[in-house]
Each structure stands twice: as C-alpha cells, then as structure tokens.
Amino acid sequence: MEVVQVLCMKGGNGDTSYAKNSLVQKKVISLTKPIIEEAITNLYCKNFPASLCIADLGCSSGPNTLFAVLEVVSTVDKVRKKMGRQLPEIQVFLNDLPGNDFNTIFKSLPKFHKDLGKTMGAGAESCFVTGVPGSFYGRLVPSKSLHFVHSSYSLQWLSQVPRGLESNKGNIYMASSSPPSVLKAYYDQFQSDFSMFLRCRSEELLGGGTMVLTFLGRRSEDPSSKECCYIWELLAVALNDMVSEVEKEGSFTINRLEVSEVNWNAYHGEFCPSDAHKDGGYNAAKLMRAVAEPLLVSHFGDGIIEEVFSRYKKIVTDRMSREKTEFVNVTVSMTKRG
Amino acid sequence: MEVVQVLCMKGGNGDTSYAKNSLVQKKVISLTKPIIEEAITNLYCKNFPASLCIADLGCSSGPNTLFAVLEVVSTVDKVRKKMGRQLPEIQVFLNDLPGNDFNTIFKSLPKFHKDLGKTMGAGAESCFVTGVPGSFYGRLVPSKSLHFVHSSYSLQWLSQVPRGLESNKGNIYMASSSPPSVLKAYYDQFQSDFSMFLRCRSEELLGGGTMVLTFLGRRSEDPSSKECCYIWELLAVALNDMVSEVEKEGSFTINRLEVSEVNWNAYHGEFCPSDAHKDGGYNAAKLMRAVAEPLLVSHFGDGIIEEVFSRYKKIVTDRMSREKTEFVNVTVSMTKRG
C-alpha cells in the first residue's frame, strides 16, 4: 500500500477525530502568525494584485483547516483597508491527500463565509475556496498560478517508507537504538522529497511568490538527542539541512527562519474544559491517536487500537512527569526569485 | 432548511446510490458529445492557450462526474496532436453543493489519472482536478478565470422553493391539476435563477469562453402536456423561454440549441446485467430514488422511503406499459461575447 493511499488524519467529528484533537497544531499556527502576516503583507503590497491565489498544503480536516486561511484573508483585508484599496478576489486552494475528509471541510464553508462576512463586511463572497486532492510531492495546480503557499505540520510526512529499514529492529521510526544506515535512509528520503517539493512549488509560484512552511524539527543534528520528537520518534529536520536544501534548489531566497516550541499537552497553561483534559498524558496520547490511527489501522487492522493507545498513554504520562516534553517547530519564510 | 443545505444525490457506492443509478444521466452526456466536441475544438483552436480552465457545474459524485471531464480533455488532446502542439495545462473545477460526496470523487482520482495516462501518454499529469463546493446560483471562481463551462441535468434544480405554492394541493411539483398561479411561481423562480446563473458565469468566463448546458426540457409551453417530466413533474423549460432568457442577459451568443430524448429506463435497448435490470419500472424508480432520496429524507425522515419507492415503482411500471416514457433534453452551446 502506498503512503498516498493510506495516510490521513482521523476523519469525522468524533471524540478521537483529528477535528477534536488538533489544539496543538492550532497553537503552532498561532505561534507563526507574525511570520505569516509579514509575508502576506510584503507580498500584497508589492503590486496590489486584483486577484490573489493562495494554497494551504496538508490542510487536513478540522477547525485548523480554515484557521490559517482566515489569518491570510484577514491580513489582506486589514492591509487593503489601510491602503484604501478594493479587496482583491482571493482564490484558496486547500490541499491534502485524496483520503482526507474534504466533505467535512466543504460542509463547514457556508458558516466560514458567514463568519468572514461578519468581520470583513461585503467582500467575503469574493473569497473562493476549492479543494485540491493529491500529494504535494507532485504538481497540484497549473504553472505560475500561486501567490502564496502555507503549510504547517505536514512536511515531516515522507512520500514513502524509505528503503533499507530492515535493520531497524523494534522501532517504527528513527530512534536512539537505530543503526546509522537507518538514519541515513530517512535522511535521504527527506532530502529527495523536500527537493521535489521545492521543485514543484517553484513551478507553481509566480515570481516574487512566497511560502511559509512550518515543520517539526530539532536543533541538534544528533538523532539520538532526546530533543524533539521521541513522542513518536518523528522525522526531524536539522536547521542546517533545511537551509542548504533550499539554497541547493536555487529558486528561493530565505526571508526568515525561526524556531518555536509547543508542549505535548495541548492544555499546558490553558483553561481545561474538564478533569480529563487536565491529564497531560491523556491529551498527548489523544493527539497522537488522531494523527496515527488511520495509518496503524491500515497496517494492523483496528483490533489493536484501543489497547495500543491505552498502553501508549501510560508511557507518555510517565515521560511527561520526568522530562520537559515539547515539540520543536521550525518555520521558514521564503520567496521565489525574480 | 435551505435547498443548498439539503439537496444532493444519494452518496456512497451502495445499491441505491446515485453512483450506481446514473446510467440515464451518462447516456445524456454521450448524446451531447458532438456538441461538447465542437465547442471545445472551436474554443481551443481560437488561440491555443497554454493553460485551459474548465468547470463542470453540478458534477455530483459517481462515474459520470469525470466522464464529461474525460470527454473535454481527450478532445483537447486529439486536436493539439493533430495541430502538432504541446498539451496545455488543464485546470478542472468540479462543482456541486457542499453536501455532495466529494470524498468519493477525490478517492477515484488516482485511477482517473492512471487511465488518462494510458490513453494520452505523458501529459496526463498536467490535468489538475479541484473541487468547488457551492451553489452555481452564486459566484464560484474568480473573475475571467474560465474558458469552458459544462453542466448536464443540473439546471432544472431551483435555488429555492418558489413562493405561492399553497394552492398546489396534492402535488409536489407542477402537475396537470396545478392552478395557473403555481405554474407562474415556478416559472418566475426559474427565470430569476437562470438569469442569476448567466450573470455569474458571464463574470467568470473569459471573453470568447463557451458554455454547453443540458437540462430537462419540453417542446411544448403547456405544462399540462404529458410530454416531458411527469415522471416527477419535474421543472420543465420551454425552448423559447430559454433563448429569450439568454438574449435578455446579453453577454452570450447562442451557437447551437438541440433537443434529444432518452428513455426513463436506462437499459432500454441495452444489455441487461441481470433479470432485475430487465424491469423498466424498477430501473426508473431506482433512478429517481438515487436523485430524490436525500431531499425526501430531510423533509419526512427516512421511515417512509422504502414504502414510497415501492409504491412509486408500481405506478411508474403501469405508466411505462401504456405510454412512451422519455425525458426530453435541451442542450444549448453559447459563447461569451468578445
């Protein structure tokens, strides 16, 4: 089975759905708000286009899907009001893999437009939202059609399982016990995928078009370092790799590169709606379940899910009680040359 | 409840789904193939654009959804090969109301691209398919962004229940027993909706852009005439109304206007895959169920559905044994003025 066919967040609106368990991902978008605002303001003020095309890649399905779009649209609206200009028509491309629950997004659009109308007044109806199913490691839209690309917490997903993982016994990802060949296999796959991503986007973006990308990362190049992702030993990207990757591709200049942190527990330092939400291990396990369940089900069937996540919750709770458990986020803003 | 929230064909792939009961609608697209081919050929040969934007409005979810798109794309491919040109990039907007089952369409896209690749070779990957949820009685895409619009068996759906139907006792639509005020109410609603449709499309189409629209119609202006749609007393459109509507709007010139017929029974004169399929009443009742069930459920609940369609099948079978039972289709091809 290919990744493109099985990877998706858990659909619907149930208790274990991604829609109900994506507060951490929302916090990450909030953290990167100033970078998005700066990028879109610079872009729009360059020549005040009458029509603006933006894309969110890996949009998933839930409250966050339209959260980033709302951010972009309100920024444009604020700037154009300040400048005394007409609101441009805004075409929004929401992209995710074909298995993503687009139906739920689409059903929420009438409410989105109503809310938009309340904050923006007339003009909300010239924001046209469309869904683009497909892998962002391939072309998604016609050449030179996009002004702005946003992607948050998506680029850590590889296009395929790397080759040469046979020796990675007992692990499902890079782990401190993984041999160097396994680390290299993941590294090579990321490099090839990310290059492909940059190449496709550089064809799709107009000259001067901008991307703001946020992914799970780490500060250290040592994959056995505890920092980052051993919540699931997720793919991590060292900053240096990332910069050199962009420079090698050659089509982009980097405007900003920033690092932020967010706690595994979505309710860390926040109001908890119930007692269950005070349990950080419970929150973190649910977060991971919403992300990982469809992938695990496609591999092992659904018989094991409850048991796996019940055990997982105990392990995560134990780690959280002893260590500082945070995701490290890398956000990069880059502009297509000339 | 508004029409935009409850109207959709029956989703999924089950026995009573629209996907499994839309052979009549497929036949209608096949019947109009020469008109689509002519329109797209003229359009493409005018100035061989490097990128072509097409939309299918009321695309629904099933095998027909991509059938019309395939028709357009293959025509462009055939013509450009004959002319020794590169295949243009083709952006496809599939539109239907937000309740439409877009997930099922999107999951079928990898296979669609594979099939396309087999017939077209390289170039299939420059056909970019996107979903546009929303009512076609409002704006769907940015100004001057479309080259070609196709819509089949969708424009007979009104944007709302007309006002003034109180006197239409015992009917759910225009019927021979409806008083003149009811006929006028439907007529006025259609006129206002269709004007709005033309206005929106004239903003979205580029100069020289073309539309091919097919709807259920009738030849006679007399709504009590048996001709056409008393399978469900569907909205019918007299040809004259339609032409005058387009001329009044003023943005379009009519290239062709044609009438065709298709039997209520999808398997009329065709190979029947099973004994059940030989039963014309059964086929016609299933066709109507796939189209009408979600609307009836939203109004009456799902308790009555089996009983209603079982009785309906008997009535339809009786009529089909005594009369020639055909849908009359009107297809119009029109081009936006310079």
Image (cartoon, coloured by chain):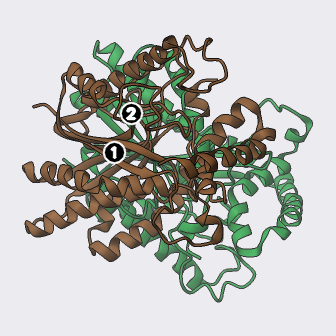
Chain colours: A brown, B green
The answer to whether residue A86 shows anywhere in this view is no
On the image, the x and y values in percent for residue A131 come to 45, 46
Q: Nearer the viewer, residue B316 or A103?
A: A103
Q: Quadrant of the N terminus of chain A?
A: top right
C-beta proximity under 8 Å, tags 1 and 2: yes
Q: Quadrant of the C terminus of chain A?
A: top left
The answer to whether residue A270 shows anywhere in this view is yes
On the rendered structure, is A135 left or right of A38?
right
On the image, the x and y values in percent for residue B108 come to 59, 34
Q: Residues within 10 Å of mark 1 (few under 14, many from 20)?
A: many
SS type, badge 1:
strand
Q: Residue B317's quadrant in the figure?
A: bottom right
Q: Nearer the viewer, residue A273 or B215?
A: A273
Residue holding disc 2: A140
For the point 62% across and 61% down, the residue is A279
- Which circle, 1 or 2, is nearer the viewer? 1
For the point 47% across and 54% down, the residue is A24
SS type, badge 2:
loop
Q: Residue A197's quadrant in the figure?
A: top left
Chain letter for mark 1, please.
Answer: A
Chain letter for mark 2, please.
Answer: A
Residue holding disc 1: A55
On the rendered structure, is A213 left or right of B215?
left
